Image (cartoon, rainbow, N blue to C red):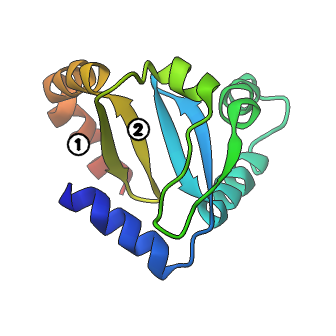
Amino acid sequence: PFSFRMCRNSFAARSVTTLVLSEADHCIWAFPLDAWEELEERLRRHPQLSPERRNVVRVLVASAKECPVDRAGRTLVPPELREFAGLKRDVVIAGALEGFEIWSRDRWAEHRQTLRVSFDEMARKLSEQG
């Protein structure tokens, strides 16, 4: 797909040689190593004893895997992450600003339907935050 080629070409232009893949939202989050390190730094700024921080770290950081990217811009998704995300045959690559998400096609369709219902409310809240 065009959006995936754009993402892959963008990573190639940045010389991305490693992606960090992690569990999140019933999908796999994929970040170039530098973007992952920025995310970790933002997490470190939150109070260590905060239950929210501890739980986010337990999900994201504990499941994170560094995966090499080959010259063609491909990476192998580890079996435990494929199982978590329910990846079988058909997948969706969804752009996500700093990285991208890897979804099973069926889960993506369900998730998109849920998002459409609450999109206006989410957009309003974001606009209020500046």
Residue 103 percent across, percent down from the top left: 37, 31
Q: Is residue 22 above or below residue 43?
A: above
Q: At 46% across and 81% down in the image, what residue appears?
A: 13
Residue at the spot x=39%, y=58% of the render?
97
Q: In the shown orientation, is residue 53 left or right of residue 8?
A: right
Q: Quadrant of residue 105?
A: top left
Q: Residue 6, which numbered label?
A: none
Specify which label sits upstream in the sequence, 1 or 2.
Answer: 2
- Distance from the alpha carbon under mark 1 to that under mark 2: 23 Å
Which amino acid is tagged 1? Ala
Residue 110 drawn at (x, y percent) = 23, 18
Residue at disc 2, secondary structure? strand
The residue at the point 30 percent across, 57 percent down is: 4
Between 117 and 102, the one nearer to me in the picture = 102
Q: Is residue 43 above or below residue 48?
A: below
Answer few, some or many: residues within 10 Å of disc 2's Cα (few below 14, many 20 plus, some between 14 and 19).
many
Residue beneath the point at 37% across and 73% down? 9
| Quarter of the picture holding the N terminus | bottom left
Say which residue label 1 marks. 123
Mark 1: few/some/many CA within 10 Å (<14, 14-19, 20+): few
Screen quadrant of the C terminus: bottom left
Label 2 is placed on what type of residue? Ile
Label total for image: 2
To which residue does mark 2 refer? 102
Furthest-bottom residue in this view = 13
Residue 12: percent from the left, percent from the top? 47, 75
Considering depth in this image, is 79 or 108 the residue closer to the camera?
A: 79
Q: Which x, y percent locates residue 108?
A: 27, 27
